[in-house]
Amino acid sequence: TEEIYESQKKVYEQLNDIENENQSVFPDSIAKGLQFNKSLFKFSGACAGCGETPYIKILTMLNGSNMMIANATGCSSIYGGSFGACPYGKDENGGIFWANSLFEDNAEFGLGIKLGNSFTSNKNKNVWIIGGDGWADDIGFGGLDHVLACGENVNILVLDNQSYSNTGGQASKATPTGASVKFADSGKSVAKKNLGQIALTYKDVFVGQICLGGNMNHAIKTLKEAQEYTGVSLVIAYSPCINQGFELANMMQESKKAVECGFWPLYRYNPKDNKLYLDSNLNDNDYFDFLKGERRFQLTIEKGKQELLEKQKEQAVFEYNNLKFKSEK
């Protein structure tokens, strides 16, 4: 162990000394260009294969230290700052400002940082409000809705892993119909809350739904566009989790299946254009093949509740067609 540690330490130090100037001919709105930017999100201690951490890494690559994060309690706060060694690094311009708030009031906390920021020397920094779907869809939704309606220039990233992951994988409003999780161990009987559709009703809120494994460049582009929009932006990111019951080494491939079958459509709405862009296709013939690849849905089948998964598919097809109708206006 010591021998490997010493050799890898030298490699790390060499890499750390390399100048991190982006000399790519490609823009940082695509993966080919962004890869040359330095990440300020380093060794997080999250579960291996966690679907949440790549999105935070991308945000730090887009911003450097020009960023302030209000983080809701949950998985992202545990791996984000639960002990003395924080994964958020610094660059030549300083470091990322990061603070954790309570589960129920993180949206208001982030808005307060933005408003208070206007009176300090840090008013050039971009404010991101980050948390899981348990915060955004459930306990913190009232505050989130308040921020969506406030008109301030703040950005919201919802890491949607579709359950209360940090406390054992219980059902949340983001849990899809038919998923077997704690407190819904025979399959959840009601529909997943559609946070994106709710936000679209405001018309002046940038709304995006992304999936890194489904389309990496779309995810990067949407995060960048959201940040550049002057006003409230909401990005909902598909974040596979160990509680979903598949091998997380296959996280990118599984995510791609989720997008291609219509389980997780990709879209973005920019109020500047007043246009909804639907950025994925629907192949619902593969829908049940995707569901059978995850234990949370296999359990439902084993318990004789196949009809819940058929209901989920109907909901997904309806949502996709609804998005398609809006995009063609």
Image (cartoon, helix red, strand yellow):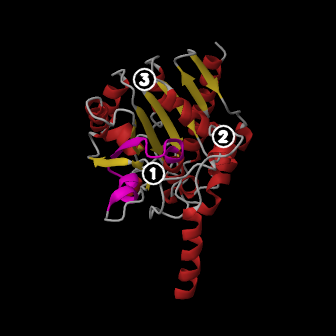
Question: What residue is shown at x 54% (from left), y 48% (from top)?
Answer: 305
Question: What residue is shown at x 33% (from left), y 34% (from top)?
Answer: 141
| Towards the viewer: 109 or 208 | 109
Looking at the rendered structure, the secondary structure element under dot 2 is loop
Q: Quadrant of residue 24?
A: top right
Q: Earlier in the sequence, mark 3 or mark 2?
A: 2
Looking at the rendered structure, the secondary structure element under dot 3 is loop
Q: Is residue 39 above or below residue 116?
A: below
| Towards the viewer: 59 or 45 | 59
Residue under pointer 1 = 92
Q: Nearer the viewer, mark 1 or mark 3?
A: 1
Q: Is residue 215 above or below residue 298?
A: above
Residue 263 visible in the shown view? no
Residue 2 falls left or right of residue 104: right
Rendering coords of residue 201 (x, y %): 45, 19
Q: What is the C-alpha distance between the residues marked 1 and 2?
A: 24 Å
Residue 66 visible in the shown view? yes
Marker disc for residue 30: 2
Q: Is residue 276 magenta?
A: no
Q: Amino acid at mark 1?
A: Glu
Q: Is residue 237 above or below residue 166?
A: above
Q: Amino acid at mark 3?
A: Gly
| Towards the viewer: 312 or 40 | 40
Q: Earlier in the sequence, mark 1 or mark 2?
A: 2
Residue under pointer 3 = 231
- State how many labels appear: 3
The answer to whether the residue labelled 1 contacts the one labelled 2, judged by CB atoms less than 8 Å apart, is: no
| Towards the viewer: 191 or 69 | 69
Rendering coords of residue 63 (x, y %): 49, 42
Magenta highlight range: 59-82
